[in-house]
Image (cartoon, grey):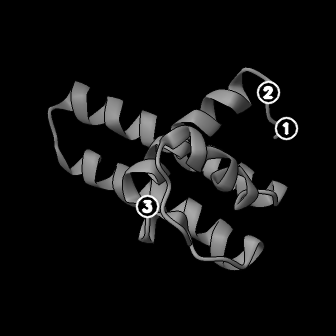
Amino acid sequence: MSRFASFREFYPFYLEEHRNLISRRLHFIGSCGVLVLLATALFTGNPWWALGALFCGYGFAWVGHFFFEKNRPATFKHPFYSFAGDWVMFKDILTGKLKL
């Protein structure tokens, strides 16, 4: 993977790595789970739920990559852009810009 000068440059690459509809759905489910688990951590005051959010988000996403996309997650080489890409893609799905 090449280096990207900006997130704007990275995001089209990110979307190419998420062409498979099942993988994209798994990312979406994982992101929903992250939000629920973080809210639970906040309301209960128990930080273990936040740790669960980490496993939930990455677990669903990585299953999508390894079993459906057949590629390596961008997280390994571009962790910050990849994290941002997850949430921009989540927003794009919610707003109907991307198909789920």
- Amino acid at pointer 1: Lys
The amino acid pointed to by label 3 is His
Whether residue 69 is visible to the viewer of this picture, yes or no, is yes
Q: Which quadrant would residue 76 be assigned to in this image?
A: bottom left
Q: Earlier in the sequence, mark 2 or mark 3?
A: 3
Task: Identify the residue at image location x=44%, y=34%.
Answer: 35
Q: On residue 78, which mark appears?
A: 3
Q: Measuring from the top left, give residue 80's x and y in whole percent.
A: 38, 51
Q: Report which residue position mark 1 lands on.
A: 99
Is any atom of residue 29 visible in this view? no
Q: Residue at x 71, y 50 (%)?
A: 15
Q: Nearer the viewer, residue 53 or 61?
A: 61
The residue tagged with tag 3: helix, strand or loop? Answer: loop
Place of residue 5 in the rendered image (x, y in percent of width and height, measured from the top left): 47, 49
Three-letter code for the amino acid on which mark 2 is drawn: Lys
Of labels 2 and 3, the one closer to you? 3
